Image: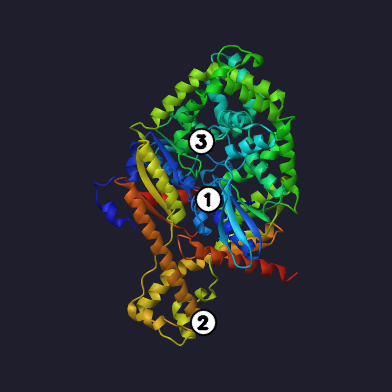
Amino acid sequence: MVAGKGGVGSSTVAAAAALAAARDGADVLFISVDGRPGMGPLLGGREINDREQTLQRVSGGGKVRGRTIPADQAFGDYLEMRGVGGVLRRAASSASLPMLAAATPGLEHLLVLGKIKELEMVRYAELSGVDAPPAGHAAPFLRAAAGLSDVVQSGPVLEQAREVGELLADPERCRALLVALPEEPPITEVIELAVDLGDDLGIALSPFVVNGCWADRPGLDKSPAMAARSHKLKLTDSAKAALESAAAFGRSRLQQQREQIERMRSQRSEPVLTLPRLATPRLGPDDLDELADALIAAAEDLEVPT
Amino acid sequence: MSDKRSTKREEPSLNDVVRNSELILTCGPGGVGKTTSAAALGVAAARAGRRTVVVTVDPARRRADALGLEAGAATDEPHQVKGVTKRATDGELWALMLDAEQTFDRLVREQAGSRKQADAVLNNPVYQAISGSLSGAQEYMAVERLHQLHASGDWDLVIVDTPPSRHAIDLLEAPDRLVAFLSHPVYRTLTVGQRTFARITDAASSMFLWAVKRLAGPQIVEDTIQFFRSLANIESGLRHRAKQVSRLLRGDRTSFVVVSSPRAEAVGEAEHLLDAISEKEFPLGGVVINLIHPQPAELSDDDEELLADLDAGPLADHVAWHAELSRLAQAERDEMASLRRMANSAPVIELPLLDVDIHDVDGLVGLADRMG
């Protein structure tokens, strides 16, 4: 379950993680909860919809499949599983889902989580990577199971909620991967999400991922003129000015990045992985390859010292 | 950055929007500084002599430090933000954090014919469960609170910072959706007359109740029917209000301000939003492009040549960084050009990515100055 504040690239990180697992030979199912556009092409396929498709095969036998899980489809599947016939099922799911959802808070989330749980229980894929809803919605989404049992006291919904709760709380089956940027608000959000999902809901946490990190450039600490001296070069005044016009901003960003990652490490015990900031504003499949490489490298670095 | 425009007087500016509107809604994707922009517009309005209230909607209730709304201190009543205004001709800035449940409760009380009817809705367990979490409730309550504040006559200007929305038009459609919900055939059958559960024969409704019972047990069926019945008492009021709000959102003194960053993802979402605003005929007041990376000065061709193929070292760091930031800044300017085209004749304000995040009133005042 991949989650983070809006705009931090958690969908991209979810896709990169799916690709990294496929490179490892796994059959991965990438599930986009809200069907964010652009994710299918990023993973090398067509736009993702409610019909599963294979997005990418990687050498070594691994592959990434992708789909969304709309609540009404999850509802239909659920009724089918409960042995409800075709005509009735269509009538029920078209007429009553909006009403049912209104009457039963969190039901739509639970139906989607329930479907994910079904897929996991039959080992439909070796790994399901779930791109959870963004911003303030991730915690309510994952809390749906716990929240529903307050309103619903009996019946299959309660059972479903319990099973989803078991899935979420079992570190062998489910982990939450929280994503931030190296800036104050998203780092704060991840620290709070970690308390919410990890400490309160009991979901096991993967290492935190800080996405979009600027490459460290220690040379920026020197002025352009000083830096040129180390290279035995003399700069024109215009070159000095041009380089300095970039350097001032770079220093302050790099410092903020260091401080924020440090703050995250000091407040939480989870390891922190960093992913590079890619220069391109519009990510393509090649960029995703690069991020998957970086994710694998960062994860390997983590494993070495201990 | 906007030198060229500020000298051309005939072009509309965001200052005009702040001076002339009675309602401003800021909307845009998450993570672009929307709350901060709404607050800065509030500062600008207060300094233009207007009594202004900024309503923020944040499910996490924590990004309002700059407005002096401490985490946990969220209430449904406005607080005055001090330190914004200095001159006697200045107005006032107030802020409040939306509490969807309280707003919903207030709406039910206002629309109910009697206290008893209101209590029947408010005390229903189904209502209690949905008022905070009903999908779209947050969006609807944001526009509802806007209407309450606007109608109170206490404010010259009400600014609502809408919830970030990936699907962008949730908020704009919230009133219409409520009406659609109340017109749903299942809802209609359930609420017409005083039928008992056993006598409801309509296929879709009995299917609905059957499904609820099957899925969630018999108690919730009773609660649900009771909830819909009690809601029926306030239904005409809700419908009427939904229409009023819908009209208000399209009024002459209403402005939508779209906030985006120049990153491709955000721009894509902002463009969807601009499309929706134009299609639904909501008045667009302007576009704020926030968090723009600075564009470094260019290196001359001779300098480029001198600095090509350096060995690793501090100067190579400088050159690589200059190239990276220049590329990024240029890509952002291309995205911004596309947003400008979408904005049509509405003013576009560009704001830089600041070295430090804005977390106090002084920061907001600085931002408001940049907007002017």
Closer to the camera: disc 1 or disc 2?
1
Position of B366 compared to B1: left or right?
right
Amino acid carrying label 1: it is Ile
Instruction: Report crowding for label 2: few under 14, some 14 to 19, many 20 or more residues within 10 A (C-alpha).
Output: few
Q: Residue at x 43, y 42 (%)?
A: B26
Percent coordinates x, y for residue A115 in the rendering: 65, 43
Percent coordinates x, y for residue B125 in the rendering: 67, 25
Residue B341 appears in view:
yes
Query: Both on one chain, marks 1 and 2?
Result: no
Most foreground residue, A126 or B82: A126
Most foreground residue, B25 or A134: A134
Instruction: Report crowding for label 3: few under 14, some 14 to 19, many 20 or more residues within 10 A (C-alpha).
Output: many
Q: Chain of mark 3?
A: B
Q: Residue furthest front?
A: A86
Residue A48 is tagged as 1
Q: Residue at x 72, y 27 (%)?
A: B217
- Indicate the secondary structure of the residue bearing disc 2: loop
Amino acid carrying label 3: it is Glu
Q: Is residue A191 above or below residue A302?
A: above
Q: CA distance from mark 1 to mark 2?
A: 43 Å
Q: Is residue A49 above or below residue A147?
A: below
Residue B139 is tagged as 3
Which comes sooner in the sequence, label 2 or label 3?
3
Instruction: Report crowding for label 1: few under 14, some 14 to 19, many 20 or more residues within 10 A (C-alpha).
Output: many
- Indicate the secondary structure of the residue bearing disc 1: loop
Q: Residue at x 52, y 74 (%)?
A: A221
Residue B246: name its quadrant.
top left
Closer to the camera: disc 1 or disc 3?
1
State the residue position of label 2: B312
